[in-house]
Image: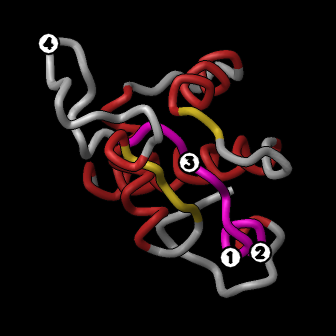
């Protein structure tokens, strides 16, 4: 029973993430910080760890793409100082057409994403 409640909560959180990214669909990418801020402003606060958990699932399903720190133009391997992002840290995300189609109901329903 507890697992079902947790699964349902995660599915709703993933749906919230996709809906927020739909608002930024015309933008090149959305930063993780802006996404966290939007979730917070809409009274759906989420930790960065929880957000990354959801982003990994959503990217794996082809609903969005992620840009990691190592993929950004300013990332330098010769500057791995304290406070710098690890190479695998997700910095930006972009809703893909398949994610937009899921939101609009044009592709098969994903039981792990609820709107």
Residue that label 1 marks: 98
Residue that label 4 marks: 82
Instruction: Indicate which label's residue lies in the foreground, 3 or 2.
Output: 3
**Tag 2: Cα neighbours inside 10 Å, few (<14), some, or many (≥20)?**
few
Hey, which quadrant is residue 27 in on the image?
Answer: top right
Inspect the magenta stretch and tell me whether residue 99 lies in it: yes
User: Which quarter of the image is occupied by the C terminus?
Assistant: bottom right
Marks 3 and 4 sit apart, C-alpha to C-alpha, by 24 Å
Residue 71 location in percent, x, y? 40, 49
Query: Is residue 81 left or right of 43 when viewed as pictured?
Result: left
Dot 2 or dot 4: first in sequence order is: 4
Q: Are marks 3 and 2 in contact (CB under 8 Å)?
A: no
Query: Is 93 above or below relative to 49?
Result: below
Residue that label 2 marks: 101
Q: Are marks 3 and 4 in contact (CB under 8 Å)?
A: no
Residue 26 location in percent, x, y? 85, 50
Dot 1 or dot 4: first in sequence order is: 4
**Tag 4: Cα neighbours inside 10 Å, few (<14), some, or many (≥20)?**
few
């Amino acid at each position: 029973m507890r697992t079902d409640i947790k699964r349902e909560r995660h599915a709703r959180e993933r749906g919230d993430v996709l809906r927020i990214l739909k608002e930024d669909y015309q933008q090149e990418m959305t930063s993780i910080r802006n996404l966290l801020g939007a979730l917070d402003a809409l009274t759906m606060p989420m930790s960065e760890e929880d957000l990354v958990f959801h982003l990994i699932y959503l990217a794996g399903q082809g609903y969005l793409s992620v840009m990691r720190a190592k993929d950004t133009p300013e990332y330098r391997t010769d500057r791995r100082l304290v406070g710098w992002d690890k190479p695998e840290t997700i910095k930006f995300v972009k809703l893909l057409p398949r994610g937009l189609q899921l939101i609009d109901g044009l592709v098969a329903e994903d039981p792990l994403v609820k709107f």
